[in-house]
Image: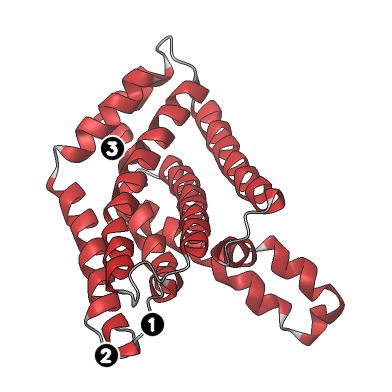
């Protein structure tokens, strides 16, 4: 498993795509927080990172599938997937190794955004006038959200040999899981089940963590979705084997 993890990280960081993806995310979020007039924290007068946590999930819907789209499609393209599947490594070890590599890249990207927090911390009047508990909860929610997106991206990568299709399908599934349940819950047809339907979506649980409330039920939800998607990936690989 560690061999797969190392191989995936080396493959990612030896390509220009890695730096383009991470640089694009940091640049766009920096513009969103400091430059764009409608969302600039310098114009709002409040030391609040909520604009960052409100917008970043929509960027992660594209960023994470872009990271994971090569996970299995590249192996299929060059013919190394068959070698992996017939090696002493189990399908679970292959999947977990690739998944942990994706998480490591995501963690690095999110850690780089901590500069926004420290900037606001020192810009506050007085210094440190920022809700640190809410920031920690929001980062926890953002990481769990990205973990779910990574599992989805890994699953879609196992379905096809095209990186473009894996990226588009992964982004679509991420959007549907994040946003669509709230939309469905507003329909009159589901009025009596609206809360239950809302709780099926990622947005409900992400919003709870973003308020600084770290509830075990929300963490269990995220872990469960990750498990379901990774197990689905294992079924696809088992069928191919």
Question: Mark 3: which secondary structure?
Answer: helix
Nearer-N-terminus badge (2/3): 2
Question: With respect to residue 130, does 155 lie above or below?
Answer: above
Which of the numbered marks, if any, corresponds to residue 37? 2
Q: Position of residue 170 (x, y in %)?
A: 44, 56
105 vs 29: above or below: above
Between 4 and 241, the residue placed more toward the observer is 4
Total marks placed: 3
Looking at the image, residue 74 sits to the left or right of residue 188; the answer is: left
The label nearer to you, 2 versus 3, is 2
Residue 75 visible, this angle: yes
At horizontal 69% and vertical 48% (from top left) the residue drawn is 216
Q: Note whether 50 is above or below 171 in the view shown.
A: below
Circle 3 or circle 1, nearest the eye? 1
User: What residue sits right under mark 1 in the picture?
Assistant: 46
Query: 10 Å neighbourhood of mark 2: few (<14), some, or many (≥20)?
Result: few
Q: Position of residue 214 (x, y in %)?
A: 62, 54
Label pair 3/1, CB-CB below 8 angstroms: no
Disc with the residue nearer the chain's start (3 vs 1): 1
- Which residue occupies 26% across, 62% down? 25
Label 1 packing within 10 angstroms: few (<14), some (14-19), many (20+): some
- Relative to 236, is 204 on the left or the right? right
Q: Which residue is mark 3?
A: 74
Q: Give the SS element for disc 2.
A: loop
Are there few (<14), some (14-19), or many (20+) residues within 10 Å of tag 3? some
What is the distance, in whole Å, between disc 2 and disc 3 at their CAs?
41 Å
Q: CA distance from mark 2 to mark 1?
A: 14 Å
Q: Nearer the viewer, residue 137 or 220?
A: 137
Left/right placement of residue 195 relative to residue 43 reads right
Q: Position of residue 28 (x, y in %)?
A: 24, 70
Q: Is residue 79 visible?
A: no
């Amino acid at each position: 498993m560690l061999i797969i993890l190392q191989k995936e990280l080396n493959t990612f960081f030896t390509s220009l795509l890695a730096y383009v993806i991470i640089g694009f995310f940091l640049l766009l979020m920096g513009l969103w927080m400091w430059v764009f007039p409608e969302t600039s924290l310098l114009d709002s007068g409040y030391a609040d990172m909520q604009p960052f946590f409100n917008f970043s999930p929509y960027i992660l819907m594209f960023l994470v599938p872009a990271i994971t789209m090569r996970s299995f499609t590249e192996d299929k393209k060059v013919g190394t997937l068959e070698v992996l599947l017939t090696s002493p490594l189990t399908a679970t070890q292959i999947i977990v190794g690739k998944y942990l590599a994706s998480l490591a890249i995501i963690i690095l990207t999110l850690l780089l955004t901590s500069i926004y927090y420290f900037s606001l911390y020192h810009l506050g009047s007085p210094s440190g006038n920022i809700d640190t508990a809410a920031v920690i909860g929001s980062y926890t929610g953002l990481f769990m959200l990205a973990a779910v997106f990574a599992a989805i991206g890994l699953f879609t990568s196992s379905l096809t040999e095209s990186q473009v299709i894996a990226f588009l399908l992964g982004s679509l599934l991420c959007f549907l899981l994040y946003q669509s349940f709230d939309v469905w819950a507003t329909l009159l047809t589901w009025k009596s089940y609206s809360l239950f339907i809302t709780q099926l979506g990622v947005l409900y649980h992400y919003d709870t963590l973003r308020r600084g409330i770290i509830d075990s039920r929300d963490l269990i939800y995220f872990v469960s979705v990750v498990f379901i998607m990774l197990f689905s990936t294992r079924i696809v690989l088992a069928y191919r084997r």
